Amino acid sequence: MNNTDIRLLGLASFASMASMRMCDPMLLQWAQEFHATPGQASQVIAAFAIAYGVMQLIHGPLGDRFNKVRLIAWGAALSALLSVLTAMSAGIDSLGWSRSAMGAVAAGIIPLSMALIGDKVSYDRRQHTLARLMSATVSGLMAGQWFGGFASQYLGWRWAFYALATLFAGAAILLMRSEMFRTADTVSHKGPDSVAAYLRNMRSFFQATLVQKVLLLTWLEGVLAFGALVFIPSVLIKDFHMSSSAAGSAMLLYGLGGLAYSHFAKKWIAWLGEAGLAIAGGCLIATGLALLLLTQQTAGALCACLVTGMGLYMLHNVLQTQATQMAPDNRSTALTMFASLLFLGQSCGVVLLSWSVDANVLHETLAAFAVAVVLTGLAASRQSPGKATQVS
């Protein structure tokens, strides 16, 4: 797999992540335009997230059965079409259905890209390659959050989806014209041929000890790290008297921390190794949360966002690299389950922290999360799928 292939996968992944976060600033505008309540408008975002999570169970077996490059390319093409339909929505219901369909289609792009890298790149180079892909997803997250708000205020929310459609269409066209698309086999012949075979395959998959350990750690990462990130803006607003827009802008530092890790990933991987990265990632997340809770200076809180983002993507890169090798014969299934457990973990973390807010113990709960994430990093450092290499 050459640099051009990785850039193309990165472009599609950038668009997929941007599509996930772009709607966050649009809720009030939707509610006003479609004469709906903010709660009804928020269901549009929930519909996308639910479809995105559930369809991981479908994209995994498809990726193991059919060629991943073609699935990614056609997923981008269908996402472009659905982006146009979203922009043309005449009511809150049609908006919800189009976003739900888009979540279902776009769900496979990032996990299948990761699985394809697992197929094509040897294990000793895989972590750095996945870090490059991760820089595209982090950039997409940041760009989606920013452009969604910019378009809503200055252009109208519909133009944001026309721009997104152009981005998806460009990724699809470039992928379909690429050498890896033209030389790809239509069918991989790896996946199960029937529902019964699929169920037997899934049972065997979940019985593997390494799979159980990596997915458990992924779930914990979702609970402790990704769950905590949802409530950092609340701490910034309450403790540091920031406005909602300022707190949202401060969270861009979290993304910049992830990009900083991606930029220096090759050097850090060589310096610390996989085990050292996992431990360092957990410790940096804990340090960022501790700084956020203990500092009384706004500058310290901003530094906390940067450090937390760097640590999170450091730990996340280790776990996703392990996930690419925990079940080589079912790599697409492994990566989509990885994504599902991460989403489920984040949801559980949000529920726990929501309870802590109502009970007025948010700070104490975040402190407990900081300790637990260090232990998660330590546990991740002890897992090793082995240095098996699979290069095709």
Image (tube, rainbow, N blue to C red):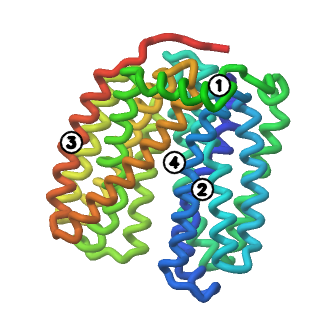
Q: Tag 3: Cα neighbours inside 10 Å, few (<14), some, or many (≥20)?
A: some
Q: Quadrant of residue 86?
A: bottom right
Identify the residue under disc 4: 138
Identify the residue under disc 1: 192
Residue contact between numbered discs 2 and 1, judged by CB atoms under 8 Å: no
> Along the horizontal axis of the image, is 177 left or right of 374?
right
Task: Measure how far apart labels 3 and 1 are at the Cα level.
Answer: 38 Å
| Label located before the other in sequence (2 or 3) | 2
Amino acid type at mark 1: Pro
Identify the residue under disc 2: 18
Q: Residue 196: percent from the left, percent from the top?
A: 60, 28
| Label located before the other in sequence (2 or 1) | 2
Amino acid type at mark 4: Val
Out of 339 and 137, give the one closest to the viewer: 339
| Label located before the other in sequence (3 or 1) | 1
Q: Which residue in the rendered view is the most extreme toward the top?
A: 388
Q: Label 2, secondary structure: give it.
A: helix
Identify the residue under disc 3: 372
Q: Label 1, secondary structure: give it.
A: loop
Q: Tag 4: Cα neighbours inside 10 Å, few (<14), some, or many (≥20)?
A: many
| Label located before the other in sequence (2 or 4) | 2
Q: Residue 168: percent from the left, percent from the top?
A: 73, 52
Residue 207 appears in the figure: yes
> What quarter of the picture does the N terminus occupy?
top right
Amino acid type at mark 3: Ala
Residue sitting at x 56%, y 74%: 26
Q: Residue 373: percent from the left, percent from the top?
A: 25, 41
Residue sitting at x 55%, y 49%: 54
